[in-house]
Amino acid sequence: EAQVTQNPRYLITVTGKKLTVTCSQNMNHEYMSWYRQDPGLGLRQIYYSMNVEVTDKGDVPEGYKVSRKEKRNFPLILESPSPNQTSLYFCASSFIDRSAVGGANVLTFGAGSRLTVL
Amino acid sequence: SQQGEEDPQALSIQEGENATMNCSYKTSINNLQWYRQNSGRGLVHLILIRSNEREKHSGRLRVTLDTSKKSSSLLITASRAADTASYFCATGGFKTIFGAGTRLFVKA
């Protein structure tokens, strides 16, 4: 089954304790991205990657790191989590539609990771 | 930054009625997408409309795009209780930007 898998699904941690949220996709997609969702703010993009070793900042990258060493994996790293990073996080992946101006992405989302930082 | 803004923020209708949601955006686009999210779960892609298209259909979904007004609408016909979800418009390519969403509640 084609899917994007995130782990953990739920996590409660404390301020300053480094954590990693993993994301893996089995569709051979080039493009992967991380979003956070907060009430009233919709989804905001944190980082995205267009291929292995190619990453770029989204709208809210502060406090996060990513890496793309393999095509299928795109982990999100919080080096020193703070309470304002309490949120619902989504990983998404897609093919890059080179026939469309702007490379239209039809995103496949993971189920989400709910993170609470105390 | 939020490119798309949905209107209304929330909508409650009876099963069988049509539901219309609107999306406005600020800058020029190449395409616009609509996604659905069931409570707290991952978003699911519904439909993509390109900037040179004015209307697109998929099952009970009808999407329109007016680039002169920088707006799009999503119409769900003959709604069902299972359509209860949040609906988001999204623009952009690699930096896809989502609106805040419309929460639709369909009463059985």
Image (cartoon, coloured by chain):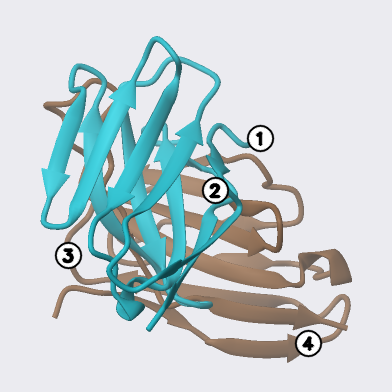
Q: Amino acid at mark 3?
A: Met
**Tag 2's secondary structure?**
strand
How far is mark 1 from mark 2, CA to CA?
A: 14 Å
Mark 3 and mark 1 in contact? Answer it, CB < 8 Å: no
**Tag 1's secondary structure?**
loop
Residue denoted by label 4: A13
| Label at residue A47 | 2
As drawn, A10 above or below A60: below
Q: Amino acid at mark 4?
A: Thr
Chain in cyan in the render: B
The tag earlier along the polypeptide, 3 or 2, is 3
Residue count near mark 3 (Cα–Cα under 10 Å), binned few <14, some 14–19, many ≥20: some
Horizontally, residue B66 falls left or right of residue A79, namely left
Give chain A's shade.
brown
Q: Amino acid at mark 1?
A: Ser
Q: Nearer the viewer, mark 1 or mark 2?
A: 1
